Amino acid sequence: MFSANPFAALSGSIAPAVMQTYVVVMILLVVAGTIYDTLHKKSAQYFFRNWRDAGSNGSRRVGAGEMVSLAVRTVLVEGLMSGEFCNRRRRIAHLLTMYGFLAFVIATAIMVFMFPTPATPAPAILPQLWYLGALLICVGGYWFWFFIRVDVAAEGNSPFRLVLADLFILSLLASATFGLIWGVLQSAGSAWSNLFFGLHVLASTVLFGSVPWSKFAHMFYKPAAAFQKRVEEANGSRSNLPPPADRPESFGSARQHARHY
């Protein structure tokens, strides 16, 4: 069951060109949404201004070799290992969701474009990677949503309160969940598979089409911000910032005790 390409079975009712066009449209939506989000929030302008200021305020110059080393460390630590998360449970949940998403999307694209019909059977590893990716998304995503995310009730809000930023994780979970159910029902020959395929497409459209309003674009910002932080620490410009609020020498520190007269 898990070694059958679920998209090839659709070729009898949906032309492969239609599925391929849909994937291309989703990619364009992500690109356009990210560009719009960057321009609307002026993220790129803020990033390059800070980069220029860090270069001029630094106490030492970072050479090309050291710059490459910092970039590699950023990719390995923040990119591949999510080193920005101090909480171990949050990091594990994020890694499960991230690698599940990559496997899910990459396997989908390969099967749709390279093995779209039963006449071009896909290697068993690709459907297995697709199912595994969807499962990892569900494990990491539901773990985060129900057990790790901020307790909104403690802030006086309803635990059922949703905001636009939740679109990413909710639509991602819906896409993976409906995709898993669709694949299983299709393999079993159930007539309900068409319903869950439609829900899977709907959730995927919301996921990739809501980039300007969700946290989808953050996956592109975070590596750049992490790299900039490493460069600032290397050239000494970050040391010019005021000390954190929890340090004794900082003004208004929580360590300062009230004086009684």
Image (cartoon, grey):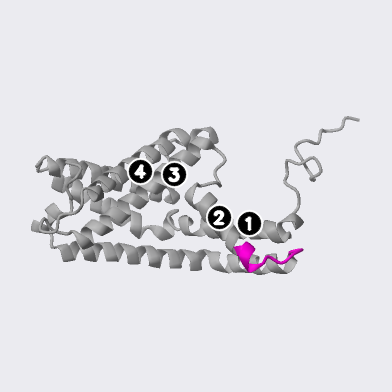
Which labelled disc corresponds to residue 139?
none
Q: Which amino acid does label 1 sit on?
A: Arg
Identify which residue, 157 or 78, lies in the foreground.
78
Q: Are marks 3 and 1 in contact (CB under 8 Å)?
A: no
Residue carrying label 3: 95
Q: Position of residue 4 (x, y in %)?
A: 17, 47
- Indicate which disc, 2 or 3, sits on the residue closer to the N terminus: 2
Q: Do the residues labelled 1 and 2 touch (CB within 8 Å)?
A: yes
Query: Is residue 62 highlighted in magenta?
Result: yes
| Residue 207 image-quadrant placement | bottom left
Image quadrant for the C terminus? Answer: top right
- For marks 4 and 2, give the one nearer the viewer: 2
Residue carrying label 2: 74
- Indicate which disc, 1 or 2, sits on the residue closer to the N terminus: 2
- The alpha-carbon separation of the residues under discs 4 and 2 comes to 24 Å
User: Disc 2 on helix, strand or loop?
Assistant: helix
- The alpha-carbon separation of the residues under discs 1 and 2 comes to 8 Å
- Indicate which disc, 4 or 3, sits on the residue closer to the N terminus: 3
Residue carrying label 1: 230
Q: What residue type is labelled 3?
A: Leu
Q: Where is residue 32 in the image (x, y as percent from the top left)?
A: 39, 67
User: Disc 1 on helix, strand or loop?
Assistant: helix
The answer to whether residue 186 is above or below residue 15 is above
- Indicate which disc, 3 or 1, sits on the residue closer to the N terminus: 3
The answer to whether residue 222 is above or below residue 195 is below
Q: Where is residue 115 in the image (x, y as percent from the top left)?
A: 18, 59
Which contiguous range is marked in magenta? 58-67
Which labelled disc corresponds to residue 137?
4
- Indicate which disc, 4 or 2, sits on the residue closer to the N terminus: 2
User: Disc 4 on helix, strand or loop?
Assistant: helix
